[in-house]
Amino acid sequence: MKKQIILSLLIFLVVFTPAHAAKNKTVYKKVKGGIETSVPKRAAGQQDVLQLACAPIPTVRVAFIGLGMRGPGAVNRMTHIPGVEIVALCDVVEKNTNAVNDMLVKSGRPKALEFFGDTSVWRKVTKLPNVDLIYVATDWKSHAMIGVQAMKDGKHVAIEVPSAMTMDEIWALINTSEQTRKHCMQLENCVYDFFELTTLNMIQQGLLGEVVHGEGAYIHGLQPYWETYWNNWRMDYNRTHRGDVYPTHGLGPVCQAMNIHRGDRLKYLVSMDTKPIGNPAFIKEKTGEVVTDFKNGDHTMTMIYTEKQKSILIEHNITSPRPYSRMYQITGTKGFANKYPVEGYALDQSVFGKNESAHFENLNAHSFVPDSVRKELMKKYIHPIAANIAEQAKKVGGHGGMDFIMDYRLIYCLQKGLPLDMDVYDLAEWCCVIPLSEKSLNENSLPVSIPDFTRGGWNKLDKLTFAK
């Protein structure tokens, strides 16, 4: 194991030093009212990748790195998408690559190349000449490292969440995408959930008025899952870091509803947390170890303010006895959407035409619409990108179908040469809460500025659009 760690560190140093780490080193400066986060200057000749469109790839050749919890499901979903060739499978554990290859053969697909054995074997995969897309589903700490090298090796890259854990990693991904003109997309599946997509369509159709506030979360007791994480990597990260270390499921759909870096931008955040109780108790129960230096609190709250004077609340809790929730609440001037604990909409009657108002005569903005009306709205405003594949998505699965829609859209856009639904700036904005919330907490909840990752392009676009 020590040998594997040393190899990983050497690969990390090769990838990030000095071309990235030295240039992108984040500096925090205390100023009146909070902490200012530095923004590295864009290199001469380097341009943003807003609405980046690359040459069409009729048959997308994919290599998968990481076949533990998320990887096998991704491979299986790709077998249901036409025009996908699965070229290579990579994991530290040999039996994982074997099992996924067996699944491929049973599905009628050719056997893929296998790479396994240590934590640096992925480097052979990104070098492969016959690969268009690297799909990364490893542990958090290796996400950005692999993503940067994949783009340097001429590949598009899709990275599981969170795709970057530090500001330096975020800027490395941005700069490499801008320099290589390769797509770098975060695999944020929750933006493709049916309720979130439908709500987004309703917002874009004007039913909720102007969105002024959003809430999201990752509240999920992980006690049944801790021992399934290879080499205990997820618990170890929470043990050594404070902050919202897993914000993207809650933040992504809210940012899309607010057109972040498409007319608005995240400006600063403030975080608070509780003391750590649940996870140290879990460690003691399972191993007998008494942990006195566990960093991450049981519950973390992060408040975010935008350039257009809108607010976002994001929460993280992976230990308390609470039902699973991503919260997902959207408050607009004409309506309100809520996903947890029950799905519902509250709408001002003024958003409906005369005929609809008569049909919905008992509507008021102080309570949810009747369930029958909610179902009508969900049917009427199903998002166009989900409408044609909804049944297939539910059949193939992946968190109720949203994982399949995510993968389908990724491949569709690559095949057609279209801009992806999410770009590297989405990745940056949704991941930056990890290091910036920790910074705020360590400074007694001081406000911390959120960089403009587009470096001046946040209002070039006027709204979020999905290419057709």
Image (cartoon, rainbow, N blue to C red):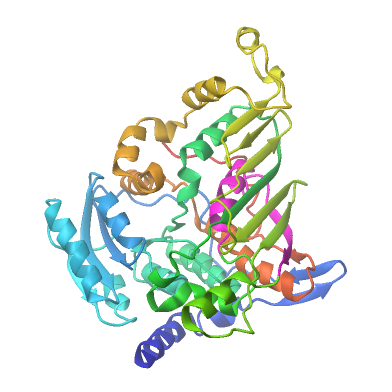
Magenta segment: 246-274
Quarter the N terminus occupies? bottom left
Q: Position of residue 430 (x, y in %)?
A: 58, 58
Q: Is residue 346 left or right of residue 466?
A: right
Residue 375 lies, with reference to residue 57, above or below; the image says above
- Residue sitting at 64 percent across and 16 percent down? 352
261 falls in the magenta region: yes
Depth check: 336 or 368 in front?
368
Depth check: 200 or 182 in front?
200
Q: Position of residue 280 (x, y in %)?
A: 58, 76
- Residue sitting at 40 percent across and 84 percent down? 8
Depth check: 264 or 296 in front?
296
Depth check: 267 or 77 in front?
77
Q: Is residue 54 left or right of residue 186?
A: left
Residue 66 lies, with reference to residue 357, above or below; the image says below
Q: How many marks are shown on the rendered structure?
A: 0
Quarter the C terminus occupies? top left
